[in-house]
Image (cartoon, rainbow, N blue to C red):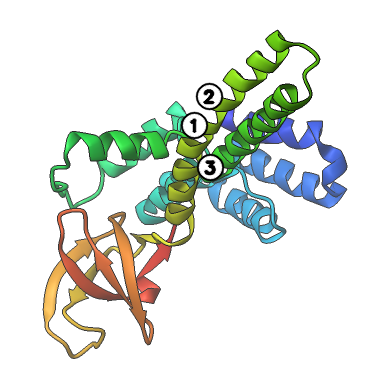
Amino acid sequence: MKKLMSVLLFLIAYSEYFSQSQLSTIQQGNSFYKKQNYEKALESYSKIIKQGYVSPELYFNIANAYYRLNKLGYSILYYEKALRLSPNDEDIQFNLKLAKTRTVDKLEEFPKIFLTVWWESLVSLLSFRSWSIVFIFFFWVLLISLGLYLVGTNLSVRKLGFYISSFTFAFLILISIIFYESYLIEVRSAEGILINESEVVKQAPDIQSGDAFIVHEGIKFTCEDEVDGWTKIKLIDGKLGWISNKSFRKI
C-alpha cells in the first residue's frame, strides 16, 4: 500500500508533466488494485507504460498484481525491473526474495573471489541513471575547483582549489570506471525471466535438436546470443542452452 500511494502522490505532485487522462488511468489502476481486481489494475498500468512512463513504484505494483494472480514469472520479471531502477529499495528486495522462494529451480552460483563480489556490489549500489548524476556532480565540482585554482585572488584560495581539484579528479576517474561498467550492464548484459511454466532447453537453436535440461517459471538467466527466434541462455551455475524467444521476457 505504501508503494501504491507513492505512485499516486508522485504523479499528483508533478501533474504538469502528465495529461489528465494519464492521471486518471493510474488512479483507476490504483483503485482496482485496492479492490483486489488485479487484472483490471494491470490493464490500467500497462496503458501508462505504453505511454512512456515508468518508475520503480509502478513496476512494483505490477509485480505485486501478477504475484496475486499466481503468475510467478511475470511477477519476478517486474520485481527485477523495479530493482534495476531502485537497487536499494528494501520492499522490492524483500518481495523479490519472497517470490523466488516459490520457484522450482534452486541453483547455486559459482563461487566468486572477494574482489569480484566487492566490485559488483559497488557497481550495483546505484542504478545507471543514478551513477550518471553522481558523475555529472563531481565533474562540475572539478570545474569549479579548477576555476578557484586558476583565478583565485590569494594563495589560500588557490591552494584550496588545487587540493579539491586533485582529489575530485582522482575520484572522478573511479566514478568514470563504475559509470562505464554500469552502462555495460545496462545495455549489453541482457537478462531474461522465464514466463512459461516450464521449458525444455535445447542444445542448438532448433526444435529438432537434443534436449539439454529443463527450466521452470521465474528462473533468471543471461541472454548471450540470438538466432532465428531462439536465444542462447546461461544459468548462474554455468549451464548453457537455447530456448524459444516466446518463452521468456527480457528484464
Residue type at tag 1: Ala
Distance Cα–Cα, label 2 vs label 1: 5 Å
Above/below status of 187 relative to 208: above
Mark 3 surroundings: few (<14), some (14-19) or many (≥20) residues within 10 A: some
- Quarter holding the C terminus is bottom left
Q: Which residue is mark 2?
A: 167
> 161 or 67, which lies in front?
161
Q: Which residue is mark 1?
A: 170
**Category of crowding for the residue at label 1, using alpha-carbon neighbours closer than 10 angstroms: few (below 14), some (14–19), many (at least 20):** few
Distance CA(mark 1)–CA(mark 3): 27 Å
For the point 15% across and 59% down, the residue is 238
* Picture quadrant where residue 73 is located: bottom left
Q: Is residue 11 above or below residue 163?
A: below
Mark identifier at residue 85: 3
The image quarter in which residue 26 lies? top right
Residue 249 on image: x %, y %:
42, 64
Point out residue 27 in the picture as x, y percentages from the top left corner.
Answer: 73, 41
Residues at circles 3 and 2 in contact by the CB criterion of under 8 Å: no
Could you tell me if the residues under marks 2 and 1 are in contact, i.e. CB atoms within 8 Å? yes
Residue depicted at x 68% and y 51%: 53
Horizontal and vertical percent position of residue 217: 29, 58
Location of residue 62 with respect to 234 vertically, above or below: above
Left or right: where does residue 22 sit relative to residue 189?
A: right
